[in-house]
Each structure stands twice: as structure tokens, then as C-alpha cells.
């Protein structure tokens, strides 16, 4: 006799099921979109929140970290919109096309939606879902199929977000800055979903900012699908700051065509729990991609970077470099997997994760992996965990540099090795200034 094993639902899982049941008829989209939601929630409901026995989530036990489910955020009021207007200040010195979301809802009066550059279209994802937009019908949920439970939950409850299309050959002179501000004064949950389609030979920079108020335990589960056509050049920057009590999960799914130049950088300096997932597939030959990031954590903050880089076509190059600075009882996690398919010959892939521990109580977990099914490749991975170099610190202090300043200089140099790959000089300077402010706040 076989005993049936039943999954005992947690309070959070029960709450999420109740939220979906209550909101299902009100969420944007009917027909195929509604069916997509139902299928996604059934997949999540069968799996439940990911936990330490799920290999991809072994270092970030979401079932333990997420004790309850916050209610879905209502539409922001005027006070909330006023708070959203002040968000995204990290990029205040950068001339951007600014698109603002308050509690996951597009705020047109705060956004640069009029007079867009030639070849650029920006629309509300909620409106596109409700109107059966052909771009959504063709691409939503198709960019990088995954059975990840957190992504399934986003698909089930996705609300608003950005639908961006850039025409073939168009060059964007200004970065497009998506500002996601959680502004409610009581804990809420938001599920932004964005889709970006970039045409052949186009040039663009896309910036995402996610932030919210301190001491309010919001929950954010965001997803961005990115399709980059042949010959395009794209830079993607993701900023996760502030909101010390927030739980934040983000998934980037990207499909790259042939001869693409793609760079992505994730910068994290706050939040209680952050999980940045990147699922990227090379769908054309001759493409080069750089996936990099830096995390600066203190207190009991937890940041997890998880990558799956799928070399589905040959002759491509990928570079991954992630830096973590961990103080107090902070925990940094890096999981990276490079997959080289059997026919993807001439692949060149290299992955490195470096963690700098500033405290005996800090923790770094690293799990780089290679899955190689081709025989003509150059691939490698590495990982280091250590403290500040005592010799270098002594060298600086012996020349009159105070201890705290000497440590800050060494940490800046450590983080700068990753930040220097950001192409836009003004954006690069803004990231380093944010790192300097974080260091100045160290006890």
C-alpha cells in the first residue's frame, strides 16, 4: 500500500490562494491571459513556496522567510503618488525617460509618455493584458519557459508594468528608467510584470529601480521578459535599495538573437530579503553577454543571486562577475549555472563570484556550475570568500590614512571591479556614489 504524501500548506500559501481566488476576476485580461494565470497558479499551488529541499532555493528558504502573505496593493491615492514622485533619486543626475509605478500601478502624470523618441513605444501592461495586445499574445510567458514557483506566482497575480517596444534600427539617446516605488504605509504585495521587445540593430539602455519606505514589510514579486533581436545593443541596470523590511523577488528572462551585445548589472544595497533570478538564453550565434552585479549588505539582510545561462547556439561569449560585501550578520548567496548545448560549439563562458566578509558573523554561500554537452568550448568558473587584505590596509594606514577610510577605499576598489563594466559613465558614477554612501553609514 502506497501512502499518499500531501503538502501541508503554510499560512502564507493559504493566504496567497485566498488572494488569487478573490482577485482572479478583477485581474486584467480574459481568455488566453486568464488561462495562463490559472495554469500558473495551479503550478504554484502544487509546488508551494520554494524551500531548502528545492535545490535552486536551498540557500533561500522562502517558506521559512515568508511567514504570511500580504494583501494585494490597492490603487495608489494622491499621497502615495506624491511619495512615488520622489523615488528613483539614485539616478537623479542621469537624463532618462522616466516611467513611474506606484504600488505596481503606472502613474501617467509622473511618467514621460509624451514626445517619446522615434521608434519607442511604451504602454501600460495592465491595459495591454486587458486589450489582448498582439505583442503580449506573442511573447508573454514564452521568452524563457521555467517551472520556477516564484515566477509562476508572478504570472498568476501579475498586475501592471511596462510594455516597451523599440523598432528596428532605433537608437535611444536616453536610458529608459522604470521606477517601481512601493508607497503604501501598510504592508502590501505587488506583482509587476513587464515585457520589452527590442528590434534588429536597435540601441537602448534600460534601468529598473525598486524601492520603498523603511519599517514597512512589503512583498514584491517582479518579472521582466526581454527579447533582443539580431545585432542590437542593450544595457540593463537593476537597482534594489531602501525598504529594510521588504521581501523582494525579481526574475529577468532574456532571449538574445545573433550578434547581440548585452550587458546587465544588478546593484543591491538594502531590503530584508532579495532574490534576483536571471534566466538568459543565447538564441543566435556571435552574441556576447555580460551579467554582473554588486551587493552591499548589513544587519541581517539576505541577498541571493541565481543565474541560468543557456548557450543554445554556438560561437557566443558570456561573462558573469558578482561582488558581495557582507557586514554584521548579512548573508550573500550566489548560484550560477552555465549550460552549453550539444550543438553550441565555440562557446566561451566564464563565471566568477567574490565575497568580502567584514564580520565574523557574516555568511557567503556560493555554488557555480557548468553543464557542458559540447566538446569545442572554453568554460570556467570560480569563487572566493575572504576578509579585507591586512597588508593593503596596513600599507594605507602606514601612510596616514585612518583605518575606517582605508577599509572604505579597499571596499570601493573591490566593488569597482564589477561596476566599471557599466557602459554609461554617469550611471557608473551614480552607482559608485551609492557605494560610498553605504560605506559612510558603516558603524
Image: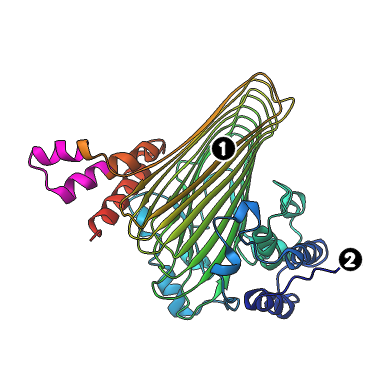
Q: Does the stretch in magenta take in 271?
A: no
Relative placement, left or right, of 234 versus 387 is: right
What span is colored magenta in the figure? 392-410
Residue 230 in the image: state x and y as whole percent: 65, 31
**Residue 105 in view:** no
Residue 421 in the image: state x and y as whole percent: 41, 35
Question: Of all residues shown, which one is farthest toward the right?
Answer: 1
Give the camera-side residue of 228 and 128.
228
- 54 up-or-down from 422: above or below: below
Going 41% across and 74% down the picture, which residue do you hit? 82
What residue is disc 1 on?
A: 170
The image's mark for residue 2 is 2
CA distance separating discs 2 and 1: 61 Å
Main secondary structure found in the magenta portion:
helix
**Residue 339 in view:** yes
Give the camera-side residue of 206 and 131.
206
Residue 372 in the image: state x and y as whole percent: 67, 29
Relative placement, left or right, of 395 versus 240 is: left
Going 40% across and 75% down the picture, which residue do you hit? 215
Colour pattern: rainbow
- Local crowd at mark 2 within 10 Å, few (<14), some, or many (≥20)? few
Q: Earlier in the sequence, mark 2 or mark 1?
A: 2
Give the camera-side residue of 283 and 117.
283
Question: Of all residues shown, which one is farthest toward the left?
Answer: 400
Amino acid at each position: 500500500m502506497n501512502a499518499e504524501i500531501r503538502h501541508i500548506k503554510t499560512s502564507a500559501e493559504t493566504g496567497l490562494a485566498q488572494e488569487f481566488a478573490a482577485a482572479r476576476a478583477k485581474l486584467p485580461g480574459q481568455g488566453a491571459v486568464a488561462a495562463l494565470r490559472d495554469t500558473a497558479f495551479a503550478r504554484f499551488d502544487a509546488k508551494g513556496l520554494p524551500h531548502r529541499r528545492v535545490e535552486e532555493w536551498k540557500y533561500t528558504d522562502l517558506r521559512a522567510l515568508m511567514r504570511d502573505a500580504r494583501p494585494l496593493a490597492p490603487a495608489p491615492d494622491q499621497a502615495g503618488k506624491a511619495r512615488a514622485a520622489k523615488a528613483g533619486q539614485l539616478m537623479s543626475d542621469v537624463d532618462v525617460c522616466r516611467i513611474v509605478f506606484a504600488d505596481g500601478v503606472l502613474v501617467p502624470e509622473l511618467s514621460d509618455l509624451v514626445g517619446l523618441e522615434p521608434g519607442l513605444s511604451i504602454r501600460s501592461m495592465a491595459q495591454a493584458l486587458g486589450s489582448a495586445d498582439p505583442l503580449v499574445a506573442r511573447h508573454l510567458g514564452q521568452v524563457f519557459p521555467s517551472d520556477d514557483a516564484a515566477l509562476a506566482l508572478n504570472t498568476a497575480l501579475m498586475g501592471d508594468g511596462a510594455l516597451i517596444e523599440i523598432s528596428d534600427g532605433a537608437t535611444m539617446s536616453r536610458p529608459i528608467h522604470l521606477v517601481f516605488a512601493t508607497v503604501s504605509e501598510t504592508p502590501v504585495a505587488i506583482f509587476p510584470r513587464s515585457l520589452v521587445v527590442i528590434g534588429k540593430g536597435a540601441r537602448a539602455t534600460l534601468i529598473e529601480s525598486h524601492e520603498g519606505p523603511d519599517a514597512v514589510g512589503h512583498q514584491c514579486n517582479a518579472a521582466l521578459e526581454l527579447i533582443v533581436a539580431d545585432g542590437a545593443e542593450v544595457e540593463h541596470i537593476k537597482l534594489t535599495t531602501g525598504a529594510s523590511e521588504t521581501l523582494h523577488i525579481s526574475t529577468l528572462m532574456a532571449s538574445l538573437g545573433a550578434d547581440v551585445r548585452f550587458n546587465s548589472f544588478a546593484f543591491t544595497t538594502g531590503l530584508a530579503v532579495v532574490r534576483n533570478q536571471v534566466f538568459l538564453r543565447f538564441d543566435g550565434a556571435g552574441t556576447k553577454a555580460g551579467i554582473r552585479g554588486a551587493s552591499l549588505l548589513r544587519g541581517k539582510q539576505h541577498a541571493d543571486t541565481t543565474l541560468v545561462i543557456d548557450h543554445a547556439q554556438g560561437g557566443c561569449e558570456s561573462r558573469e562577475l558578482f561582488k558581495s560585501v557582507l557586514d554584521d550578520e548579512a548573508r550573500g548567496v550566489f548560484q550560477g549555472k552555465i549550460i552549453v548545448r550539444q550543438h553550441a560549439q565555440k562557446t566561451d563562458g566564464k563565471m566568477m563570484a567574490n565575497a568580502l566578509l567584514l564580520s565574523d558573523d557574516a555568511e557567503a554561500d556560493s555554488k557555480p556550475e557548468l553543464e557542458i554537452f559540447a566538446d569545442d568550448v572554453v568554460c570556467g568558473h570560480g569563487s572566493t570568500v575572504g576578509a579585507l587584505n591586512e597588508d593593503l590596509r596596513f600599507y594605507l594606514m602606514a601612510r596616514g590614512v585612518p583605518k575606517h577610510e582605508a577599509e572604505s577605499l579597499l571596499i570601493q576598489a573591490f566593488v569597482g571591479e564589477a561596476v566599471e563594466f557599466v557602459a554609461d559613465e554617469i550611471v557608473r558614477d551614480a552607482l559608485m556614489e551609492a557605494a560610498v554612501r553605504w560605506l559612510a553609514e558603516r558603524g
